[in-house]
Amino acid sequence: MKQSATKRRTSRPKLPKAPEEMRQWSACVLQEVLAWEGVRSRPMFGMTAVYRGAEIFGALPRTRAMDSPYAVSFKLRRDSTTAARLDADPRIIVPEAAPMAGWVSFELRSGDDIPDAIRWFHLAWRHAGPKKGRRRSAAAPLGPRGRPGTDEGKVPTTLSD
């Protein structure tokens, strides 16, 4: 039996357009993130997705954004420390549609918020790293720029650090 030609399509969420100012801020964040070890990027739905190895950990607006025209998005594991940090930052947006998916957005209010966005992306980059129980390389730990002995394990506990 044939299905009706007027099949209902599921509605997709509208992705807000990213203003030029936000595109510039995203480019600044992306430039920093791409310098970290194992990070690559590729276009995705008007955004630039960033991966650590095969695991996606963030999305930056090119022409579209996820939750707000001025937001960057990243994926985090929800432990008690991370949840407390997310709750404490008024610029964080947790999507209503899928709050447990791990995706959250950070709304930039000005270019002064770029360092905080980078700190959130660094946390997402760390969460996308090797999982506990997996064998790590015998090499020295690498920092956010992929350089030995820099900042690894020293992610600020507050975003003002």
Image (tube, helix red, strand yellow):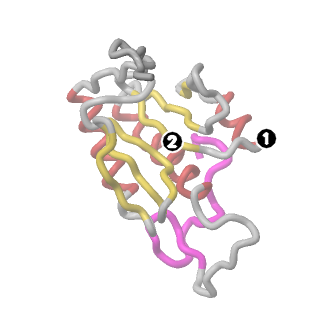
Residue carrying label 2: 74
The amino acid type found where label 1 is placed reads: Ser
Instruction: Tell me the residue at 42%/35% (across/down).
Output: 72
Which segment is the magenta one?
A: 141-161
Question: Badge 1: how crowded within 10 Å, few (<14), some, or many (20+)?
Answer: few
Q: In this orientation, which residue lies closer to the viewer: 143 or 46?
A: 46
- Tell me: residue 71, above or below residue 4: below
Residue 88 horizontal/vertical position (percent):
67, 29
The Cα–Cα distance between marks 2 and 1, rounded to whole angstroms, is 17 Å
Instruction: Tell me the residue at 49%/63% (across/down).
Output: 144
First of labels 2, 1 by sequence position: 2
Residue 48 horizontal/vertical position (percent):
33, 45
Q: Could you tell whether 55 is left or right of 157 in the image? A: left
Picture quarter containing residue 130? bottom right
Q: In this orientation, which residue lies closer to the viewer: 64 or 10?
A: 10
Looking at the rendered structure, which numbered label has been put on residue 7? none
